[in-house]
Amino acid sequence: QVQLVESGGGLVQPGGSLRLSCATSAINLDEYIIGWFRQIPGKERTGREGVSCIRPTDDDTYYRVSVRGRFTISRDNAKSTVYLQMDSLGPEDTAVYYCAAERNEIITPQSLCATGPRNGFWGQGTQVTVSS
């Protein structure tokens, strides 16, 4: 049974950092594209937005414009885990962060981040709150 379990969220002051982890089970990372998405409070009608996505086979990555230079996505195949290092956090980054996985067949990291998984999997989410 495929499972994605996020961890690492919490409360951090503006300018601070957090590292989120997405531990996967029952999937081979080389067969999937993994993405981080977030649901911003008060924007439920617009849905989850793609933050960063990675194709582990060649480390092709995509970042939404607002996080470029601040967030870094990486993976550890041996641990079946994908990370999101978040630096220089601001209140606008406050959200529930989810990881998702979609088979690496006809999609790209950019397309996964744009649309979310169509036939893939979601984790349960982890709360990130940036506040002083």
Image: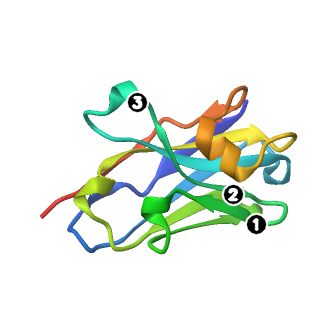
Q: Which residue is mark 2?
A: 54
Mark closest to the chain's N terminus, 3 or 1: 3
Q: Residue at image x 40%, y 30%?
A: 46
Give the mark toward the camera: 3 or 1: 3
The 10 Å Cα crowd at callout 3, few under 14, some 14 to 19, many 20 or more, is few
Q: Amino acid at mark 1?
A: Asp
Describe residue 98's horizontal placement relative to residue 57 as left or right: left
* Residue 26 shows up from this direction: no
> Where does residue 103 sit, x and y in percent of width and height?
80, 39
Distance, label 3 to label 1, CA atoms, is: 29 Å
Relative to residue 31, is residue 22 drawn left or right?
left
Most extreme residue toward the left is 132
Residue 13 location (% of width, % of height):
20, 68
Q: Earlier in the sequence, mark 1 or mark 2?
A: 2
- Whether residue 131 is visible: yes
The disc labelled 3 sits on which kind of residue?
A: Thr
Question: For residue 59, which numbered disc appears in the image?
Answer: 1
For mark 1, give the secondary structure: loop
Q: Residue at x 36, y 25 (%)?
A: 45
**Residue topped by disc 3:** 46
Task: Determine contact: label 1, label 2, CB under 8 Å.
Answer: yes
Which residue is depicted at the point 50% across and 48% down?
A: 6
Q: How is the image coloured?
A: rainbow
Q: Earlier in the sequence, mark 2 or mark 3?
A: 3
